Image (cartoon, grey):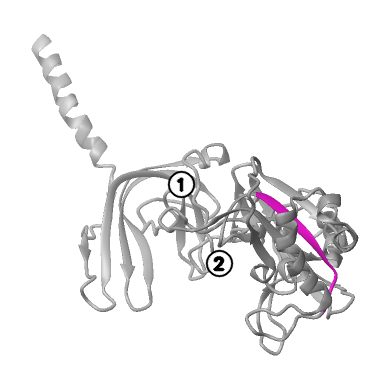
Amino acid sequence: MFRKIIAVILTAAVVLPVCSCSTVKRSGKPYINRSDDFVVDGFNYRTEEKQTDNFIAYRCKDGRVLLYPVSAEKALACDPDGLCDVEPGGMYKIKYDVQYVTGGFAGIMKAYFLAVYSCTKIDCDTLFENGCLRPVCGWSGIFPIAPRVDGLDYMAFENEDGGYDLYSETCGKRHYDEMREIKFPLEFENDDPVEMEFNVFCNKDLTDEYIKDCLLNRKTDEGFIFFNADHPGDTAEGMNYDSIEKASVGFIYWHNIICIESDEPVTEETRRLITYEEMRDKTADELGLPQDVYDQFYPAWEARVNGSFSYYGTDNEPAAKYDVLLFGGDFGQNVDMQYDSDLKLQPYDWHDYENTSAQRFPYAALFIRSEFNDLLPQD
């Protein structure tokens, strides 16, 4: 009897792992690892095995349910290929094998599961535990919508039943009824008005005027969240523009940024608004600025306010009232500007300087229209 019991235990020890393995779902498709770089418009194939990641499931434009990885290292949606039962709007932790295919004439980038070892439903508390590499582009069929604004960390997907689901590391999961365009003109003293456009996710019970008032006064409301200020082209050239950028500097930031040299070191990041009236009436000493710094940005400011400024040989820009945003810190020659979730302009040193030699500057000045500063104070 004792021997029979031992035999049963040993048999179970052998059978259990086999049963565990039998739960793995496989597509039956081959695992391909091959590069066709030597062929014009060739494809590259790469597999990864036994990966574990968190995903958001969503239905894309062609009807397929895809899985977007929430990871600090991955940002390509995966096709589960029928290997796991997932529903749009759900969050899942999945252990899987995956096939990547990239290249081709159209620049294809796709991924599909080859095997799924486990699939567990999770919530927003653990969704971002491995970080998140947010997409830099808008909706293209496989990417979620994500704001390009410092301080906003969400991703949005169209909900099957209407509206949008937003997932955020700081705010959790939220649902909004619609994406809405809020437009209004901003008048300038010596130039054409700019039609401002605030794009937001919001609920239907909020009016445009209320949302506009909240944004201009830096007030928050869980009934809406800012997305961007992109305005579709409606000029003869049909050029799209960011309405905050266009209203603040006249066209694009690069036209109105200068980097400033100085022998006096800057030990911490600083931000200072100098108004048109202060620039017109006060000296460097009265403004409390190093003379060499003032001497570099004053002529650039003066050219803009008297109508003698031109960019790369274009016609002179119209005379306008400009304030100055003076930033102290450590800036490369390719420093750009962006705005944050409070719609405040700030330096954005996007360039990778590690592998290139570039001069560094302790100051950067941005010339902004006074009327824009009146609308959205930048001090």
Tell me what residue is drawn at x 49 percent, y 43 percent: 131
Q: Which residues are magenta?
A: 319-328
Judge from the rendering whether residue 127 lies leftward or rightward of residue 76; answer left or right.
right
Judge from the rendering whether residue 277 lies leftward or rightward of residue 29; answer left or right.
right
- The vertical placement of 134 against 6, above or below, is below
Q: Secondary structure at mark 2?
A: loop
Name the amino acid, label 2: Trp
Whether residue 69 is visible to the viewer of this picture, yes or no, is yes
Task: Provide the residue designation for mark 1.
Answer: 72
Task: Provide the residue designation for mark 2.
Answer: 139
Q: Secondary structure at mark 1?
A: loop
Quick one: 112 or 12, which is closer to the camera?
112
The secondary structure making up most of the magenta span is: strand
Tell me what residue is drawn at x 84 percent, y 79 percent: 191
Residue 377 location, x and y as percent?
83, 56
Residue 312 location, x and y as percent?
62, 80
